[in-house]
Amino acid sequence: MERLEDPRKFEVFRAADQIRAEGKERVALGNVWARVGRNAGVAGGSRIVGEHLSDWAEKRGYSPIIEPSELPEAVETRLAKAAAALWEAAGAEAAGMLERDRIRMAEALAVERALRTEACGMVDARDAVIAGLRAEIARHASELDEMRKHVGIVRAREFWQRVAQEIWDVLPEHEPMHVNDISRRVGHEVIKEAEEHPGEWGPELLRGVIDQRVKFKKLFANEGGGRYRRRRPEDDAA
């Protein structure tokens, strides 16, 4: 038999031919499907096997009416002869009916395939929309995360500026003060808010805030020994 383009169709034809040649049972969807599985290891969906089996029956001129199975041989022979005679007598009318049925089935199948194609197209379109929405959500989530990070940086910068201002307010106008004394005089509200930011509140944290501004010559000057004072105009002149 000439090999068909669709491997599954070839396997259905091969299995149906084998079952028919064996003559032990009627060629049907169930036993063809099982035989394809044994021959090829995979049969595909029942609808696909059924479509190929219908094509096989048409091309082979197979009719289970005149090819009975699972009956005693003598009964099979008589039944086959009677069925063949009946088939020949009603040939013209039966052929016309079969042709009309074939046309109707072909039209119904064409409609079904068109609907299936349309449905698949709708599913593909839906999947494309969903994929696009997911990508859009991911992009917005990334942007939101960046915005949150930026807001966190801005809030932290503003908070430590307020801490520096609080230290400035605590320091005497002309005298230095030890960082331990500064930490004890900072307001409770600032200390409470510091819990939302990295670092353990205490003299060492305040020393870091002060030293950073001393480094850039802003607000404070270092008197040594852990003592700091307000920065003066002459500090900049020096």
Image (cartoon, helix red, strand yellow):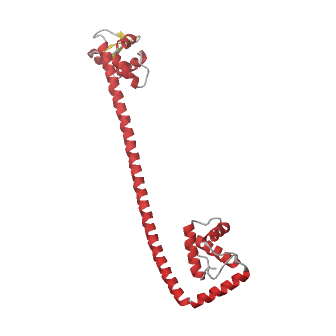
Q: Is residue 162 above or below residue 185?
A: below
Is residue 172 toward the left or the right of residue 142 in the image? left
Q: In the rendered image, is residue 159 in sight? A: yes
* x 32%, y 26%: residue: 158
Residue 49, given in percent of the width and then of the height, sits at 58, 70
How many numbered marks appear?
Answer: 0
- Viewed as shown, does residue 88 lie left or right of 238? right
x and y percentages locating residue 136 in the rendered image: 38, 49
Task: Tell me if residue 217 can be seen.
Answer: no
On the rendered structure, is 68 left or right of 97?
Answer: right
Between 231 and 178, the one nearer to me in the picture = 178
Residue in front for this viewpoint, 171 or 5: 5
Residue 90 x, y percent position in the rendering:
56, 89
In which image quadrant can residue 86 be found? bottom right
Image quadrant in which the N terminus is located: bottom right
The residue most toward the top is 175
